[in-house]
Image (spheres, rainbow, N blue to C red):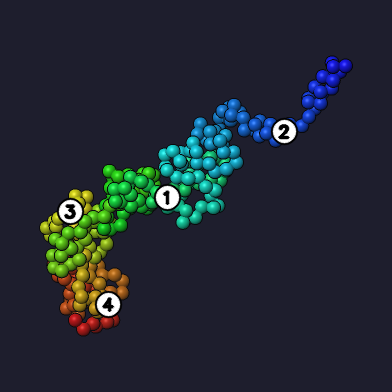
């Protein structure tokens, strides 16, 4: 009798449906994941620990970029300063690596601010000693300390201590002083900006003398009478067809 009962029990168990837990365990078997050559080690781990989602754990996004993996269609400019759609997040899940530059601690602790465009504002410089948490996407910007010597310029020009002098000098209205004017930070350089109250009052603009006036502007006798602060370096361009009273 006992043998008959045991036989029936074994038959029932052999034909019973697997539980939900059994299905899940079989679906996310780590041995099966390890045998997949198409997935990196980090991606295998991420898929095992977070099946079905955009996990950050064990991804290049979280480990090396200080970012967060998010569904690509849910990423907004408010969430991220920089978005990478490379292989930093689990593959095949439409995930993007969202990086918030302002979350970087070392730069903030030293008084800087992380920027996502790899370039600092004109009045700042890149602080390489206080990197952001995502150095490949963000840079740490520190403000240049403005000095009176630079701000006073040479002839009432507007001086600016900047860590981005090369880019500013690409603009027609900036120029280097005839003799270097010191800035407090060694990473910053003093550049001057052409200006002139009379020229600007006549809707004119002051630019470097060797540059051509923009289209629609001219440097005629009237413009020269208006002048700019540093006449040796800058010139006034007034709108064509106007005769400002200078």
Kindly report the distance in space between the C-alpha atoms of the residues bearing marks 4 and 3: 35 Å
How far apart are the two marked residues, 3 and 2, measured between alpha carbons?
71 Å
Tag nearer the camera, 2 or 4? 2
At mark 2, the secondary structure is loop
Q: Quadrant of residue 129?
A: top left
Q: Are marks 3 and 2 in contact (CB under 8 Å)?
A: no
Asked if disc 2 and disc 4 are in contact, CB closer than 8 Å, the reply is: no
Write down the quadrant of residue 63 in the picture.
top left
Q: From the viewer's side, name the closer residue of 134 and 201.
A: 134
Label 1 element class: loop
User: Residue 68 in the image: x percent, y percent?
Assistant: 48, 45
Which residue is the site of mark 4? 203
SS of the residue at dot 3? loop
Q: Residue at x 46, y 41 (%)?
A: 61
* Labelled disc at residue 19: 2
Residue 39: percent from left, percent from top: 54, 33
Q: Secondary structure at mark 4?
A: loop
Residue of label 1: 100
The CA span between labels 1 and 4 is 42 Å
């Amino acid at each position: 009798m006992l043998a008959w009962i045991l036989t029936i029990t074994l038959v029932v168990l052999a034909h019973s449906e697997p539980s939900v837990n059994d299905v899940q365990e079989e679906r996310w078997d780590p041995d099966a994941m390890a045998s997949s050559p198409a997935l990196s080690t980090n991606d295998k781990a991420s898929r095992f620990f977070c099946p079905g989602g955009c996990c950050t754990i064990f991804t290049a996004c979280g480990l090396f970029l200080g970012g967060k993996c998010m569904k690509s269609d849910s990423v907004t400019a408010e969430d991220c300063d920089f978005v990478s759609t490379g292989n930093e997040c689990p593959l095949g899940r439409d995930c993007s690596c969202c990086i918030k530059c302002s979350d970087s601690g070392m730069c903030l602790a030293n008084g800087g601010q992380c920027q996502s465009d790899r370039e600092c504002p004109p009045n700042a410089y890149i602080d390489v000693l206080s990197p952001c948490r995502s150095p490949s996407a963000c840079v740490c910007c520190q403000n240049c300390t403005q000095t009176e010597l630079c701000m006073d310029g040479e002839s009432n020009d507007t001086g600016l201590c900047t860590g981005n002098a090369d880019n500013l000098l690409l603009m027609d209205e900036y120029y280097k002083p005839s003799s270097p004017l010191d800035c407090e930070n060694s990473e910053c350089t003093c550049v001057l900006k052409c200006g002139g109250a009379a020229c600007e009052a006549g809707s004119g603009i002051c630019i470097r003398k060797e540059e051509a006036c923009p289209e629609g502007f001219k440097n005629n006798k009237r413009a020269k009478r208006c002048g700019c602060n540093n006449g040796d370096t800058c010139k006034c361009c007034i709108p064509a067809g106007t005769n400002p009273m200078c």
